[in-house]
Amino acid sequence: MPDYLLLLFAYLLGSIPSAILICRGMGLDDPRQHGSGNPGATNVLRTGGPQAAGLTLLADLGKGAAAVLLAINMGASLLLQGWVMLAAVCGHLFPCFSHFRGGKGVATTLGCSLLLCWPLALCQLLFWGLIFLCGRISSLASIATAAATPLFCYLLIPALLLPFTITSLLLILRHGSNIRKLIIGREHHF
């Protein structure tokens, strides 16, 4: 498969609107119409409950992992696998199947990390958990983890520093509204 088709397929895979499909399948409201308006696991937890949120999390992790697994099975270089990660995350952030209104990309990125470098994924997960335990704010944990990921990548798999850095920047930018709420003290706590 040519590289551009692999990247396109990864984008399309990332574009699958997991939260919307799962909520629809469970007879729940569209998560974009409630809570934060974000079609991701955290908002689904608030608006649809833990079962729907768990399925959304698994689906978002799975589509990132599936994109990278496809690249691995196609014999893609490590760097191309990193660009496949970025394409899948861009699909999640800006999905063509739901008017380019996507989620924040955290779970999809973690799904990619699990196959690209599991120790990096472990660092991301532990760091997210530590920040969340300290503040009980999911978005703060996600933003901090995205900011720390390039350092983890530099230490563990420097060949993928550029794709991970770009992905991290996109994740931070997608959390712009959360950053504003954090600054004024109005972000959701758990």
Image (cartoon, rainbow, N blue to C red):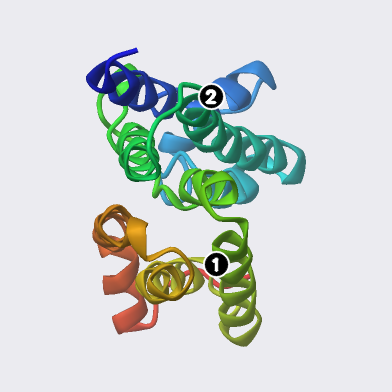
Q: Is residue 88 left or right of residue 112?
A: left
User: Which residue lies most toward the top here?
Assistant: 1
Residue closer to the observer: 40 or 11 = 11
| Quarter holding residue 92 | top left
Q: Tell me residue 164's x, y (percent).
A: 34, 57
Residue closer to the observer: 116 or 104 = 116
The three-letter amino acid code for the residue at tag 2 is: Asn
| Quarter holding residue 96 | top left
Image vertical order of residue 129 relative to residue 34, above or below: below
Q: Quadrant of the N terminus?
A: top left
- Label 2 sits on residue: 73
Q: Tell me residue 180's x, y (percent).
A: 26, 72
Q: Tell me residue 134's x, y (percent).
A: 61, 87
Residue 7 got which mark? none
Name the residue: 50% across, 44% down: 112
User: Which residue lies most toward the right here?
Assistant: 51
Disc 2 packing (10 Å; few <14; some 14–19; many ≥20): few
Name the residue: 33% across, 72% down: 181
Residue 124 got which mark? 1
Mark nearer the N terminus (1 vs 2)? 2
Name the residue: 53% across, 24% down: 73
The residues bearing labels 1 and 2 have C-alpha atoms spaced at a distance of 25 Å
The three-letter amino acid code for the residue at tag 1 is: Gln
Give the number of the mark in front: 1 or 2: 2
Secondary structure under the numbered disc 2 in the rendered image: helix
Residue closer to the observer: 183 or 65 = 65
Secondary structure under the numbered disc 1 in the rendered image: helix
| Quarter holding residue 154 | bottom left
Q: In this view, does 162 lie to the left or right of 36?
A: left
Q: Tell me residue 145's x, y (percent).
A: 46, 71
